[in-house]
Amino acid sequence: MTKEKKFYEYLAEKLPTWGNDEFVVEKYGVSIATIDKLLPKLKEEYLANWTKKKSFNPYILLMTLNFLKTNPSYRTASKEFGCSKETYQKRVSNCLQAIANCLPQIEFKDRYGTSTESLKLNLVVDTTLCPIEKPSNIEVQRQHYSEKHKTTGLKYEIGVRTDSGLACWLGDPYRGGEHDINILLDGGLLNELDKDEVIFADKGYQGVSEEVITPIKGKILSGESETLNLKVVDSNSIFSLINLLWNWILRQSILSSRFPDFLEILEQIVENFNCRFKRFGALKQQYRGAIARGEEVDYSFHKLMVEVVVKLCNFEIQNGSPLRAECI
């Protein structure tokens, strides 16, 4: 009997609800099917790079997933998993890096989906804030404070495909006080786009660049804005193409009241990805770890957590757990 088989029998005996996917997602953030598919990849990575032993303890994966999902204190979690605080921290840190290594990379070239020669729209982009504990240094605290969210945090720019919601862009961490537009302009995403390629973003990005399509602000629109409700800044050729597309969609919506709103679908895609992303308490709740000592900041561990969660979300999308059907 393999160690993994014994491991599952042990879980079934110790946790009567282990076979219940709802319980597993609540405790570990991902489904049983995802854990089943991830374990062989992680075992191979561990045996190759992380241990001198000839065996791999699957319980380390559950320990790490639980850390991401429930955001426990190291003291509480180490007691639950029956090890010292130092051992727990080391196991979680190593396993996070191992997961990041064994899952597919987040590749910008994977963004191509349903775009055409006439409308090169592949990505929906948004910035999400992950709360952190207030740094002790007042100036560092001020830099990381977001007026919008009324908390200190780190911001990450995420770009997902318009057809499936697969994340193909993850930007570097920025301080919570940084404006989303500055992150977009500084982060490098726009420089990676093909000629005439555009991205979709929410109303907060309106007017930032000719490569960014946004809904027009305001509920009461008139004339061309009411027909289109879409804007491309200073790009007449692309604007004409999108105008044609939107007029076609408008005609279809008149013919069928069930035709979904184009812009709402694009917004729902990134919102639903963020919902799955924020399923993990370490990113939704206030992160317990320190990102600063005095004026010195270190985002490396937090960035690793975010990378792992985004890759786990992608892994689920690619392995039978798509985003909600209305977003695809």
Image (spheres, rainbow, N blue to C red):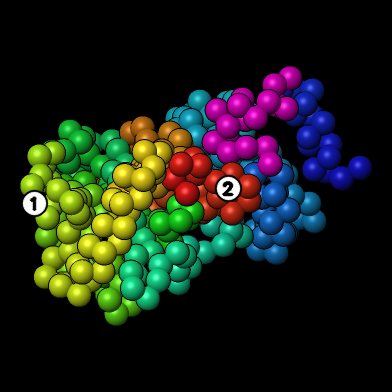
- Give the structural element (helix, strand or loop) at label 2: helix
The three-letter code of the residue at mark 1 reads Gly
| Residue to which mark 2 is pinned | 316
Rendering quarter of residue 112? bottom left
Classed neighbour count for the residue bearing mark 1: other residues with Cα under 10 Å, few (<14), some (14–19), many (≥20): few
From this viewpoint, is residue 141 visible?
no
Whole-number angstrom distance, CA of label 2 to CA of label 1: 43 Å
Tell which residue pokes out farthest to the bottom in this image: 195
- Give the structural element (helix, strand or loop) at label 1: helix
Q: Nearer the viewer, mark 2 or mark 1?
A: 1
Tell which residue pokes out farthest to the right in this image: 1
Asked if the stretch drawn in magenta spans residue 17, the answer is: yes
Q: At 40% across and 39% down in the image, what residue appears?
A: 258
| Residue to which mark 1 is pinned | 223
Q: At 8% across and 47% down in the image, what residue appears?
A: 222
Residue range (magenta):
16-33
- Left or right of 221 in this view: 49: right
Which x, y percent locates residue 67? 51, 36
Task: Name the quadrant of the N terminus.
Answer: top right
Q: At 46% across and 41% down in the image, what residue appears?
A: 326
